[in-house]
Amino acid sequence: PLSKMRRDPSSKDLGGGSSGVSLQWEYEAMMGRLERLRSVKQAAMADMEASRSKIYEAFSALQGCSIEEASQAPEMQPYSDIENDLTQEQREKFRSKAEEYHERVAERTKAIVTLLLDCQSTIRELEIAPPTDVCVGRYDDDTKIMGSLEPIEENANNLDGRRRGQSDLYTIVSLFESPTCIGIGKAALDRLTDRITELNGEKRRRRARIAEMVEPIMAMWSMLRVPEKDQMAFTSSIRGLGLDTIRKGEAEIKRLEELKSVMIGKLVNEQRQIIEDLWKKTNSSAAERASFDNYFHIRDDGQLTSEVLAKHEEYVATLKSKLEKMQPILDLIAKREAIIEERIDLEMLQKDPDRLKGRGAAKQLAKEEKMDRRVKKELPKLTSTLERMLWQWHEENKLPSSNDEEEELGHFMYGGTPYLRTIQCQEEEWRTRKERGELERQRKRQEERNAASAANTAFGYTNTYTKLPGKKWIPSTTKNSTSKSTARPRSASTLRPAGSNIRSGSNMRTGGSHSTAGSSNSSRSGSNMRFGGRGPLGDVSSSRQNTARPPSRPRGPHSSAGGGGGMNRGEKTSSVGGRGYRPASAPRMRL
């Protein structure tokens, strides 16, 4: 370093040889170092000046003031001096502050662009874009609003393919307010907020006004039978929410009012026809109809004014509202009346005994089962639901009156009668009908019995069958009933008394003499049927019990003379029962 070198004022060596450093050489070295320091200072000051300019410009844009005013602001005083402190720390402070204000400007710009787009869209919709004679609220900034935006250069060619209302496609023309730009100042932000509020309020008012005109226009179009072609022509001429749209709507209403005044008589008559139809649908009573007599019976054309027509229209609206409330009950009544008709039809069908004998009997049976299911299941549920709804209707519409004639005003009328009374009458009539039908069936059965009894008496039969009440009597079992469960069932041929005097099979076969009186036990054996002869026709005991079978022949070796010749062929002697004994397990001849 120069400070460590030995100084020799008398030396002429500029290079600082062994003799020392001269003053000239030291001067030139210090001047070069000074120049370098000056250049560093200028660069530092230039950097801080650029940062300060950005800070001042952003602050003035955000506050909506000039740069000179911004430099005098108290917030900017820490950044006014850029000469006394040129350290790296100070320069970083300036740069960070400039970036901070840049971000604030970007945020404010985005908010301003969004408000400007909303204002421009609403201004175009209301058709008040300058230059115009229509003034809405504080319109002084409308010119600035319409000229403050420009598309971003990189997106300028793509605006047709994207929405024009997107804020990222536009930027503001200038950060500062001018005759054609509103800027991004705080005052501009407040004015834009107030302006969009005014425009939206005007937009709502115009929409409400147009909506108020649409309903009467549509009603009068329908009332006056305006051709559809004229309606479409008027509709196509309406665009946006401009005052021109409102003027056209008001003009159309005026034209229709004039046309209505000419056709007032015809229109009143049409309304009266509608009223009569609604009276029928709502089953209005005479008292309810009489409440509109003051207007309904006006026949003089001079008295048929718009007020009378309006009264008719209001009354029609009232009846339609009433019909809308009555419709659920009317639907249930219609369904119940249909089932009532089915109940009568089903009764008439069941009186025909031959209805299920021909072709299609299965379909007829399925139809009757479906009808019967509706009558027995759906009808009671419908009746219960209707009664509850009808009483609720009565509670809501009854009048505080003690007059019996006016008491029906609160009830639900159907066919000129309260339907609650109709339900009671229908059920009472059905019970009476069923009782009459039952009495008629009993009368016919009694006539048939009387006719059968008279016929039997004419032919000499006095013992006619008469069904006794109660269950059929079954005789008690005998003392041998314990063995009946294990005994072999007997046929009709074996159920005969032991003492019956029936010829034996041997006498029938050989033609011998009858048995003597002592041979009471020589009844014909069923086992001899295989040798020929007539079948067993002996008397059968009146008892239904399975009594023991008598032996077919005497069991001992000595038999009666009358029955001795009966076993010429095939005679066998049983070791158990004697001659002619047939075991119970032996097969029997069946005829």
Image: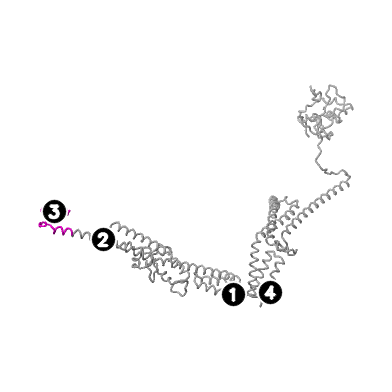
How busy is the neighbourhood of tag 2: few (under 14 within 10 Å), some, or many (20 plus)? few
The label on residue 43 is 2
**Quadrant of the rendered image containing residue 72:** bottom left
Q: Which residue is mark 4?
A: 298
Q: In this picture, is 565 found above or below 222?
A: above
| Helix, strand or loop at mark 2 | helix
| Residue type of the residue flagged with mark 2 | Ala
Q: Main secondary structure of the magenta part?
A: loop
The earlier-in-sequence mark between 2 and 3 is 3
| Residue type of the residue flagged with mark 1 | Glu
Marks 1 and 3, how far apart in space? 118 Å
| Helix, strand or loop at mark 3 | loop
| Helix, strand or loop at mark 4 | loop
Whether residue 5 is in magenta: the answer is: yes
Marks 2 and 3, how far apart in space? 35 Å
Marks 1 and 2, how far apart in space? 83 Å
Q: Which residue is mark 1?
A: 257
The quarter in which the C terminus is drawn is: top right
Q: In this picture, is 586 found above or below 106?
A: above
**Which percent across, then down, holds residue 395?**
69, 60
What residue do we see at 77% from left, 32% from top? Answer: 489
Q: Are marks 1 and 3 in contact (CB under 8 Å)?
A: no
Q: Nearer the viewer, mark 1 or mark 3?
A: 3
Q: Which residue is mark 3?
A: 6
Marks 4 and 3, how far apart in space? 136 Å
Marks 1 and 4, how far apart in space? 21 Å
